[in-house]
Amino acid sequence: MLRQSSSDRSARLILASRSPRRRELLALLGVPFQVAPVTIAENARPGELPEEMVRRLAQAKARLAAQRYSDGLILGADTIVVLDGVVLGKPRDEEEATRMLKALRGREHQVCTGLALIESATGRGVSRVVFTTVTMRDYGDEEIARYVASGDPLDKAGAYAIQHPGFRPVVLERLQGCYANVVGLPLCHLVEMLEAWGIRPTTDVGSVCRTHLGVPCRLVETAFPQVESKAR
């Protein structure tokens, strides 16, 4: 396989993701980046904890993309919804999306994102897992039906988008942790990781979240720790 070069410092960061939401969020930081979409199996292994799963998948995505570049810092990410210890991925169809939304209704759950940065030239990297605790409002069956019929839930973990203007499923006042994490990329935590590699955003992450996401965003300790480790 030919290895592409990303030696241009203006495009040192490479996002290993197909998610349009992650591309949009990363662009808000004002950091130049390329996109290298990857596809991997996103199934949990037997006995694997949610935080282990998202870390492994984020690292796998970053490593797969790194094979195509001789230089550059590769960002991999994976997000899941966890209800009572059970991982809710993307629904297979409308029926499963409906079941997920009914199970989440009026209840608290966690959104878990794994982040991985890998330097393609050396293989060095770090990873982090970020949790946000989310409480859903008591939406009705008709609301679920309309939302599922829109098609929006089918490509989202847990079958919902926190930012959806029509459904608005989350009680924002009870959110514990990073809002952007629930959208798909915890910007405040990512900024910390990027700055450790010498990549500094041109915009303030707090201002970005207030202006573009409509919520204040800050580094916080949630009900679960953010666990960081060296990638092998």
Image: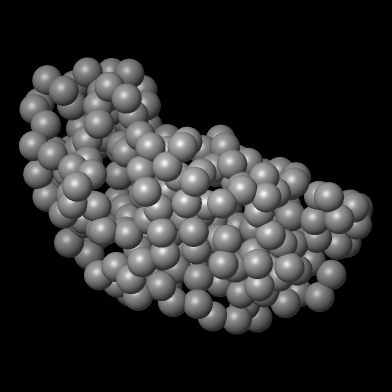
Left of 167 or right of it: where is 46? right
Q: Nearer the viewer, residue 98 or 123?
A: 123
Residue at (19, 47) in percent of width and height = 173
Residue located 56% across and 71% down the image: 127
Give percent across and percent down for residue 53: 43, 66
Percent position of residue 204, x then y: 56, 51
Give 226 or 103, whichever is nearer the viewer.
226
Count how many numbered circles sit on residues in the image.
0
Q: Quadrant of residue 136?
A: top left
In the image, residue 201 lies at what x, y percent?
Answer: 66, 54
Give the quadrant of residue 80.
bottom left
**Measuring 50% from the left and 77% from the top, which residue is drawn there?**
228
Quadrant in the picture for the C terminus: bottom right
Please, which colouring scheme is shown? one colour
- Location of residue 92 with respect to 191 vertically, above or below: above
Left or right of residue 13, residue 178 in this image: left
Res. 36 in view: no
For the residue pair 169 and 202, the one nearer the viewer reads as: 202
List x then y, in percent, for residue 103. Answer: 14, 44
Give the left or right position of residue 47, taking residue 34 as reference.
Answer: left
Residue 76 versus residue 45 in the image, above or below: above
> Which residue occupies the foreground of this view, 84 or 93?
84
The N terminus: image quadrant: bottom right
